Image (cartoon, rainbow, N blue to C red):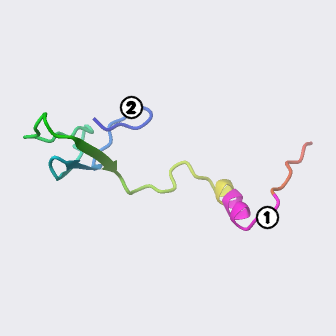
Amino acid sequence: MITTDDTEPVQGVTVDISGGAQMTMNSSNNGNFSFKNLTMSSDYTVAAQLDKDHLNGVSTFDLVLMQRHILHNKPSVARTA
């Protein structure tokens, strides 16, 4: 089952398996996925990917700080009242 940090199921995650078998599927509405006909005598690698909502949790202030870092600008000092 694929969930968020808050244990909410995530639908539509692409799940790839490689190694003893090559398969791809998407997680269901409740975050579940299942690969069938795998043998116990093989090694497998499972990788999950969801490519959406890139700015989830990123604020405009975060973007300004990243820009300053990339441009090697001195960070501003917070003012106190």
Name the residue at the top extreme: 7
Assess whether residue 70 is covered by the magenta stretch.
yes
Mark sitting on residue 61: none
Tag 2–tag 1 contact (CB < 8 Å): no
What amino acid does circle 1 point to? Answer: Asn
The secondary structure that dominates the magenta segment is helix
Image quarter where the C terminus lies is: top right
What amino acid does circle 2 point to? Answer: Thr
Q: Residue at x 27, y 44 (%)?
A: 46
- Residue annotated with mark 2: 7
For the magenta stretch, what is the residue range? Answer: 64-74
Q: In the structure shown, which secondary structural element does the residue marked by tag 2 occupy?
A: loop
User: On the picture, is 16 further left or further right than 7?
Assistant: left
Q: Position of residue 1 (x, y in %)?
A: 27, 35
Q: Pick whichever, 20 or 26, lies toward us.
A: 20
Q: CA distance from mark 2 to mark 1?
A: 39 Å
Q: Is residue 69 above or below residue 35?
A: below
Q: Nearer the viewer, mark 2 or mark 1?
A: 1
Sequence order check, earlier mark of 2 and 1: 2
Query: Residue 72 is drawn in which quadrant?
Result: bottom right
Q: Position of residue 76 (x, y in %)?
A: 83, 55
- Residue annotated with mark 1: 73
Q: Pick whichever, 46 or 53, lies toward us.
A: 46
Q: In the structure shown, which secondary structural element does the residue marked by tag 1 occupy?
A: loop
Query: Residue 7 is drawn in which quadrant?
Result: top left
